[in-house]
Amino acid sequence: MTKLTQTGPSSWSFEGELTFATVAGMLTAGPKVDPTKPAVVDLSGLTRGDSAGLSLLVEWLAAARASGGVLRYTGLPENFARLAHVAGLDFLNSPSEQ
């Protein structure tokens, strides 16, 4: 099961897979970012991911920025962080860069 759960006013927890098979349903389920405070998504519950999952995370960042907000990711699993590095998306693993 793949799900994004709001755990606080501007924090979310992700559980499950971010793969080609799951991202379509997650696109509009992204975090609702308040422009007045940074939002955080904890990805430590991510069990599997691929390039489609990386694209979704980038899309959520773009949507947050378009609304004037800031979105940060924490708990990026090592295997997914390596995939992000290979794809040139190291900023996903660097909260200060977002």
Image (tube, rainbow, N blue to C red):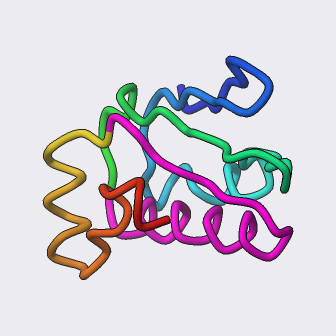
Image coords of residue 70 (percent x, y)? 66, 59
The structure residue drawn at horizontal position 24% and vertical position 39%, both measured from the top left corner, is 77
Q: Residue at x 55, y 64 (%)?
A: 56
Determine which quarter of the picture holds residue 86. bottom left
- Is 58 positioned to the left or the right of 46 in the image? right
What residue is rendered at 56% in x and 27% in y?
A: 13
Q: Nearer the viewer, residue 19 or 76?
A: 76
In this rendered view, identify the residue nearer to me: 46 or 65: 65
Place residue 40 in its image quadrant.
top right
| Count of all numbered marks drawn on residues in the image | 0
Q: Is residue 18 left or right of residue 10?
A: left
Q: Is residue 63 magenta?
A: yes
Please report the residue visible at 73 percent of the width from the left and 19 percent of the height from the top.
8
Q: Position of residue 79 (x, y in %)?
A: 15, 48
Q: In the image, is residue 84 above or below residue 6?
A: below
Between 55 and 70, the residue placed more toward the observer is 70
- Main SS class of the magenta portion in the image: helix
Would residue 31 appear left or right of 42 to someone viewing this image? right
Farthest residue in the bottom direction? 88
Is 82 contained in the magenta span?
no
Left-right relation of 25 to 1: right
Residue 97 x/y as whole percent: 41, 67
* Quadrant assignment, res 63: bottom right
The correct choice, above or below, for 63 with respect to 24 in the image is below
The magenta stretch spans which residues? Answer: 50-75
